[in-house]
Amino acid sequence: MSSIIKKEYDIPANDFSLAGEASSNVRKLLTQLGVYPTVIKRTSIAMYEAELNVVIHGNGGKARVEIFEDKIEILVYDEGPGIEDIELAMKEGYSTAPDFIREMGFGAGMGLSNIKKNSDRFVLESEPNKGTRVYITIYLY
Amino acid sequence: MTNYFHSVTLEEDKCRGCTNCIKHCPTEAIRVRNGKATIIKERCIDCGECIRVCPYHAKKAVTDPISELSKYPVKVALPAPSLYGQFGQDISRERILKGLLELGFDWVFEVAKAAEIVSDATRRIIGAGNVKKPVISSACPAVVRLVQVRFPNLINNLLKIESPMEVAARIAKQTITERENIPAEEIGIFFISPCAAKVTSVKAPYEKKESFVNGVLSMKDIHIKLLEKIKSIPWDFDGDLVSSGAYGVGWAGSGGECSALETPRTLAVHGIHNVINIFEEIVEDRLKNVDFVEALSCTEGCLGGPLTVVNPFVASTNLKWQVNRAKERDFSGENTAADYQDLLWTKDMEYKPILKLDDNMMKAMIKMQKLEEINDGLPGLDCGACGSPSCRALAEDIVRGLAFETDCIFKLREKVSDLADHMKAFEHIYRQKTED
Ligand SMILES: Nc1ncnc2c1ncn2[C@@H]1O[C@H](COP(=O)(O)OP(=O)(O)O)[C@@H](O)[C@H]1O
Ligand code: SF4
Ligand code: SF4
Ligand SMILES: [Mg+2]
């Protein structure tokens, strides 16, 4: 079945002030649709973390959001350095973010696990030097 | 009172339909239709932004006239702390309070004192730990309404304690009935307000059934008369009228409520659009290490309220002097709220989803699809000439059935030029036919 609403967003590299723009847009969209506040909250947290990873680690990329009758599907992807060891990356507290980024309050290593926690289905695909793709599914009801 | 009482209203005669206000409204509550602005009642949070930006002063805050005082045998003034910022540094708090008595009030009770009580209760609530953090201040009614209509996920973060104004009104009424043996109905409690939002919160409270405040006067309305009275009071007058310490006085400006909490994990934001940005950070879990957020709708907090007189930055300097003077006195022992249960809200706050396109989610999705389509066809200039705040807002109004595509002057021009082309073609055929 095809989606009812489809949106694409660019995620620029290295600009923290713009990280969150796409997730904030999606939040407004879901609010207008009358989606439950708790579902909106989970969606925006998951999407923000995925967006932030593309800004910090992925050298910029894109987000595609599709809304179906019963679910939201989000794909956040980049063609950046990719992830060597996915299992390790998923561990809470694991982060390769450099010190200066940590000093800015990012890079606590909780992002990926937070995305997983907030989504109903979560798939992470990554290949070194090719890029990373995060698939998030959240049910509306 | 109806559900949608609003202090902020439009004076139609003065409105020229200039569209200045529509872009500044934080909830997109204003439209210009048929040459006049209208406010969508469900959406307005009484922040007063539109009052500030209207060049023709067509937006105003409805407050009570001073003549209301005569309805009550006993008249009590509750000055908002922001009143202290409206006078220069040669005018002490003692003189301001005495001035109010000379204006015709029988009692004055400082809202600043109640603010100290609220701060003490807040400290206890945060300390107790079983609250959702960050706790968001509920002192500014415009901000509380903003949460109610735009940030349902933050309703549980709101500090569910009555505002200093309500606490002051309650204490004043209790004290006077008990001490003077005067029946409550004979006591008129008047809040001296810096803003429209406070008026609305008295006439249509969200946190309980009925307010303890009987009337709300605009700071602007009484300022000159008050100043006149103050001028005739000796500069060193001290009539034992002050009851608040420095923290309570400091509440008037941005950061005041935070300092009163005496903990570093606080954040103070002011200006409604800045407040929205911080709230977005909170809902996305981006704001870390903060236990308390003071959020005030006006720039520089209540000192920048739409009914204040003095420039907010000047008022902030004036207030600093008042705060420093207040440090000489300490009332902290009196202003405790060990038993803050009385101060808790007695009504739950419900989410009012003003933004949704339809009650049925599937229908809303179809409307959204349509909205996106219409939006793609609009020029994207956000010129406001259609009377909606942005092209997207016009697209939204169209799917809601409140506007037409031809309200957009560019669309109208396209339609007119299409029509002209049709006419030309028609004329051509007609000529050919008649020449045959
Ligand atoms: N889009 C991405 N591209 C490359 N590496 C990534 C990407 N997303 C995550 N990673 C890797 O996974 C690690 C863990 O990610 P995350 O849990 O979000 O923590 P954090 O971003 O705080 O480091 C990152 O430090 C990084 O090494
Ligand atoms: S008072 Fe604020 S919310 Fe109400 S119409 Fe004016 S700008 Fe909009
Ligand atoms: S900041 Fe103060 S003056 Fe401004 S709307 Fe809120 S309560 Fe009123
Ligand atoms: Mg991350």
Image: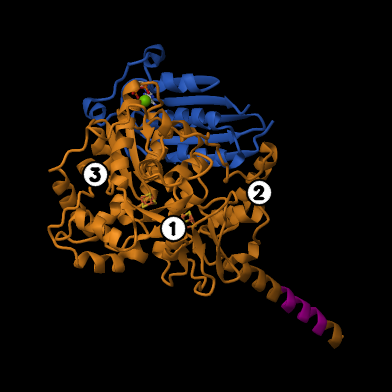
Q: Main secondary structure of the magenta part?
A: helix
Tell me, yes or no, whether the highlighted magenta stretch contains residue B358: no
Tell me, yes or no, whether the highlighted magenta stretch contains residue B425: yes
Residue at 50% x, 34% y is: B346
Pointer 1: what residue? Answer: B24
Q: Mark 1: which secondary structure?
A: loop
Which one is earlier in the sequence, the residue at label 1 or at label 2?
1
Q: Colour of chain A?
A: blue
Which one is earlier in the sequence, the residue at label 2 or at label 3?
3
Which amino acid, mark 3? Ser
Pointer 2: what residue? Answer: B370
Which chain is represented by orange in the image? B
Which amino acid, mark 2? Lys
How has the structure been colored for display?
by chain
Position of residue B142 measured from the top left corner of the image (x, y, whole percent)? 44, 48
Note whether residue B119 is visible: yes
Whether disc 1's CB lies below 8 Å from ligand 2 is answered: yes
Position of residue B351 measured from the top left corner of the image (x, y, whole percent)? 55, 38
Quarter of image, res A30: top right
Residue at 33% x, 33% y is: B292
Which one is earlier in the sequence, the residue at label 3 or at label 1?
1
* Marks 2 and 3 share the same chain: yes
Q: Quadrant of the C terminus of chain B?
A: bottom right
What residue span does the magenta drawing correspond to? Answer: B422-431
Q: Of B234 and B152, which appears nearest the observer?
A: B234
Indicate the quadrant of ligand 4 in the picture.
top left
Q: Are marks 2 and 3 in contact (CB under 8 Å)?
A: no
Which amino acid, mark 1? His
Q: CA distance from mark 3 to mark 1?
A: 39 Å
Pointer 3: what residue? Answer: B243
Q: Could you classify mark 1 by the number of other residues whose Cα lies within 10 Å: few (under 14), some (14-19), or many (20 or more)?
A: some
Q: CA distance from mark 1 to mark 2?
A: 26 Å
